[in-house]
Image: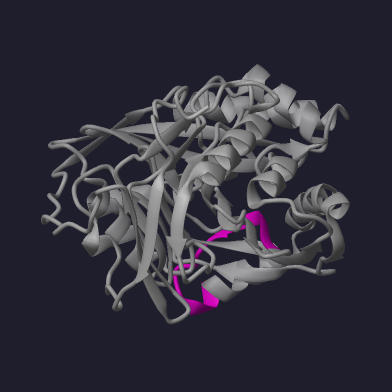
Amino acid sequence: MTVALGLTRPLLVRTVPVADPGDLVARLPKAPPFAWIRHGEGLVGWGEAARLDVPPGPGGFAWASDRLSALFGEARIEDDLRVPGSGPVAFGSFAFDRDRPGSVLVIPRVVLAKRDGHAWLTTIGEAHLTTASAPAEPGRIRYGDGTLTAVEWERRVARAVRTIRSGRLEKAVLARDLTARADREIDVRVLLDRLARRYPDCYTFSCDGLVGSTPELLVRHTGRRIESLVLAGTTQRGLDAADDAARGAALYASRKDRYEHACAVASVREALAPLCSSLRVPDTPELLVLPNVQHLASPVTGRLSDGASVLDVVAAMHPTAAVGGTPTGTALELIREIEGMDRGRYAGPVGWIDSRGDGEWGIALRCAQVSGDSARLFAGCGIMGDSDPAAELAEAQAKFRVMQYALEG
């Protein structure tokens, strides 16, 4: 199996404790970075010790889990810490549509991490910690239409509303994209630094060119304990404190948004219940206030009934109603019919898994696919029977601002 991956011998992995490295992003070299950071803690990595390009199809998650387990099982690991994220770690991101290519898992040669008062360095083979060079600013950013113009996208939203009112489904999430071109090659470290500082409550990530800062935790797996944060229902921030509070109150009172949120929570409950011996789902949502928007949010916790890894849980949960719709199968059909673009890994799972099956995965929202001097930005909105196309376009524009800030500063 390792020969098929291009490896001729087992991975030689060593994890050692280190002094607090400070700003994790500042320690990254120019090599394409991997990152998962929240409140200054998490993991960063670089180099490729092994790579799994996951084949498209319904069995992609099982294929990835089997091969990753075999790869970790053959590795020679020195790890006295044995905390979540120590030892060998694979960063991954999966295509939104299981039938599309692009899903990938990468085990970096170097991982630097800190969490809960611990800091550690994991190296594979002869890899070692290097001195980071100063990142370069991308310069002026020029934007252009993505797959659809704003007017064309509003028409797709109106079409989705008509379909929902016909009774075919209750909700569909429609995404749109925006292109960006910089004067110079885009250094992902610049984007990570800006995102981590501006959105500390979110999960700032980087994996194989997909970069962003998502507010939505799909699942955190620690031993047999799992946590998830369901987000659905959004409003923009206000112009001042009073306007902000009024918008939050209106969102909380909105029948449309509360129903959309309830559908998303039900989707997560249905996915997790068969895996868990206990599951706690709140009866009502809370408000999550971010620098650009406010969300309805429900934290979900549970305890797994068997030895499922975080990747097994991700496979059971994706796609949730929050990024697909309700019923999910019908919503995915409508998305393929009218969205008019390939989402790639936008709204797919992104995160990391260690050799014990622990890890953290989010939904790849507020993100962009970066390549050279160009980037493709993504945003999506939950469409219901009473959705207004102009309001949904404004919501998408607000969500684009996260990555526009990362590019422009």
Q: Residue at x 52, y 29 (%)?
A: 343
Judged left or right of residue 340, residue 279 is: right
Residue placed most toward the observer, 362 or 254: 362
Q: Quadrant of the C terminus?
A: bottom left
Q: Is residue 74 magenta?
A: no
**Residue 400 in the figure: left or right of residue 19:** right
**Residue 14, how many percent across, how many down?**
37, 58
Q: Residue at x 64, y 27 (%)?
A: 98
Residue 233: in magenta span: yes
Position of residue 341 relative to residue 409, above or below, is above
Which segment did they paint magenta? 227-243
Q: Is residue 197 above or below residue 137?
A: below
Q: Is residue 177 above or below residue 293?
A: above
- Which residue is most to the bottom? 117
Position of 120 with respect to 293 (left or right) is: left
Q: Find residue 377 and report its horizontal and vertical position in percent.
A: 40, 38
Q: Is residue 393 visible?
A: no
Q: Where in the figure is residue 214, as x and y percent of width and height? A: 50, 54
